[in-house]
Image (cartoon, grey):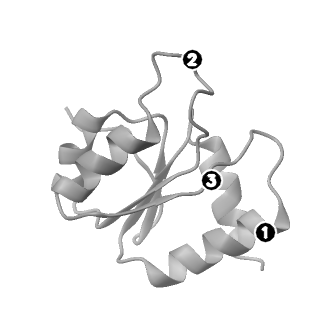
Amino acid sequence: MPLPIACHTDQFGTLGQISPHDVAEIARQGYKSIINNRPDGEGGPDQPSNAEVEMAAKALGLQYAYLPVVSGQITLEQAQEMSRLLEEMPTPILAFCRSGARSTNLFMLAQQV
């Protein structure tokens, strides 16, 4: 079943929380990089850890970055780092957080720095 990825450009999309099992579908859809914007433990013990998702991504040859952002508290430094990742990581890139909104907001701010 296809994941409900919000495609903001042909090179960038966002999604809510993913599991290590979702990474194969993300790769199948052509994404080359994943950015995790959700802090570990934010969703409690059922949330997959950054390390678990990263391991699945790297096993499939995807680039991976961990840029955790607290909801509603995006900093200038985080927007600058997101901008750098968007420039340097292989495209297309998928970013995720709890719902996808935080990653979308970070993407929009990264376009302005």
Residue at left offset 57%, top offset 17%: 44
Left or right: where 39 falls relative to 33: right
Left or right: where 25 falls relative to 78: left
Q: Residue furthest front?
A: 51
Residue on which the image places disc 3: 104
Mark 3 or mark 2: which comes first in sequence?
A: 2
Q: Secondary structure at mark 3?
A: helix
Give whichever of 52, 111 is nearer the camera. Answer: 52
Mark pair 1, 3: CA separation: 16 Å
Mark pair 2, 1: CA separation: 26 Å
* Residue 10 in picture, x, y percent from top left: 40, 70
Q: Of tags 3 and 2, which is closer to the observer? A: 2
Q: Secondary structure at mark 1?
A: helix
Give whichever of 77, 108 is nearer the camera. Answer: 77
Task: Name the kind of residue labelled 1 in the image.
Answer: Glu
* Residue 67 in picture, x, y percent from top left: 59, 56
Task: Name the kind of residue labelled 3 in the image.
Answer: Thr
Q: Which image quarter holds the C terminus?
A: bottom right
Task: Name the kind of residue labelled 2 in the image.
Answer: Gly
Q: Secondary structure at mark 2?
A: loop
Q: Residue furthest bottom?
A: 87
Q: Of tags 1 and 3, which is closer to the observer? A: 1
Mark 1 or mark 3: which comes first in sequence?
A: 1
Residue 20 falls in which quadrant of the image?
A: top left
Residue on which the image places disc 2: 44
* Residue 87 in picture, x, y percent from top left: 52, 83
Res. 77 mark? 1
Decide: is 102 above or below 28: above
Left or right: where 49 falls relative to 90: right
CB-based contact (under 8 Å), mark 3 and mark 2 = no
